Amino acid sequence: MAENSQNQFAGLDLLSSAVVVLDARLAIRYLNPAAENLLAISNKIFAGCPLEGVMECPPTLLTALNNVLQHGWGYTGQNIGLRLVGGELLQLNCTVNPVDAPEAGLLVELWPIDQQLRATREERLVEQQQANRELIRNLVHEIKNPLGGIRGAAQLLERELNNPGLREYTQVIIKETDRLQDLMRRLLSPHRPMQPGPVNIHEILERVRSLLTAEFPTTLRVCRDYDTSLPELVGDREQLIQVFLNIARNAAQAIGRRPDGGAQGQITLRTRVTRQATLFKRRYRLALEVQVIDDGPGIPDDIRERMFYPLVSGRQGGSGLGLTLAQSFVQQHQGTIDCESRPGRTCFVVRLPLA
């Protein structure tokens, strides 16, 4: 009987939204993969269990479910709080509709509010980055030629100077123009074509881990929390190394600025798989999720909304290009990058399509 129920609702697996099918007793008959992922439960294990045994439903939702069963009315609820068995509170929008099918009475569709906000934020970030890209390209071309002229003039001037003490000033000019030219090159580097190929994400993260350990041998501990069953993805190996190195190095430098000074900080590299993921309005059956978590002081409030913009840095002397490059490379892989930060815990989440 359970197998028939599985086949009957298999078409729901194609939806990116979480769908729960309930019977007349409000017992779970079916969970699609998105619902399994959202509620952190398995359809095979929990099919047949009462809904209230899986989550704590508010009275308004229970009343609405019963009304739909009795009267056939559809229901739409917004900002509903569901507390899972593990204690996690989900804020959701939902719709409930009657279903005319054997062993089924209700179809409940759930949308996490934070997911909808994330989708809106992702769209805004893409538009902003496209505008930034065009602005930067124009600025770089306007600046590069004068810099070359300044450097050439400084070299000619240095040859004409007989006083070695004055040559120190021409060297300052030459070195600073070289630094600015390098900055221009780095600003344009996200625009180089990708070189895709099979990539093992854990090999990339291990490379990042070894670089961090060498750069911060005493002040940083790098922990691993890998899902080793993850398949390879198609991507540009060098770009992905740069993505996670930029994120993790920023975290390590932030940890070094904590008030407790010499206390050792921690960065955790975590990998997971996400089912039925939507990345930039395109749905993928499987997506890779990489989390870079640190216990640093958090991202300052005044730059949190602008941290992916070029030349925005929370560190004195920082170029403000690390996260800009990371975001650009992730988007070239059709992925997303997001961040949640508070004092003592900052988590960058990178999602990349697998299938």
Image (cartoon, rainbow, N blue to C red):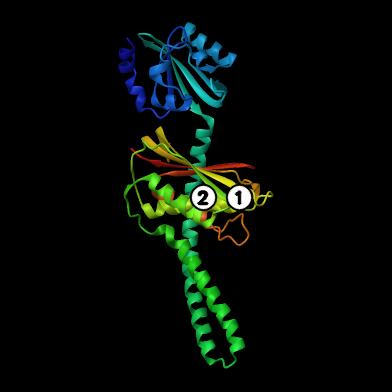
> In the rendered image of this protein, does residue 207 appear above or below residue 122?
below
Name the residue at 64% across, 48% down.
263
Q: Quadrant of residue 289?
A: top left
Residue at the spot x=43%, y=39% of the render? 226
CA–CA distance in space, label 1 to label 2? 10 Å
Nearer the observer, 131 or 354: 354
Which quarter of the rendering shows the N terminus?
Answer: top left
Residue 228 falls in image quadrant: top left
Residue at the spot 32% in from the left edge and 16% down from the top edge: 8
Quadrant location of the C terminus in the rendered image? top left
x and y, in percent, of residue 328 in the image: 45, 52
Query: Furthest-right residue in view?
Result: 259
- In the figure, 124 relative to 97: above or below? below
* Residue carrying label 1: 255
What amino acid type is highlighted by mark number 1?
A: Ile
Most extreme residue toward the bottom is 162
Q: Secondary structure at mark 1?
A: helix
Task: Point out residue 60 in the picture as x, y percentages from the top left corner.
Answer: 58, 15
Whether residue 216 appears in this view of the structure is: yes
Nearer the observer, 343 or 6: 343
| SS class, disc 2 | helix
For badge 2, the amino acid type reads Ala
Who comes first in sequence, dot 1 or dot 2? 2
Residue with the mark numbered 2: 248
Q: Residues within 10 Å of mark 1 (few under 14, many from 20)?
A: many
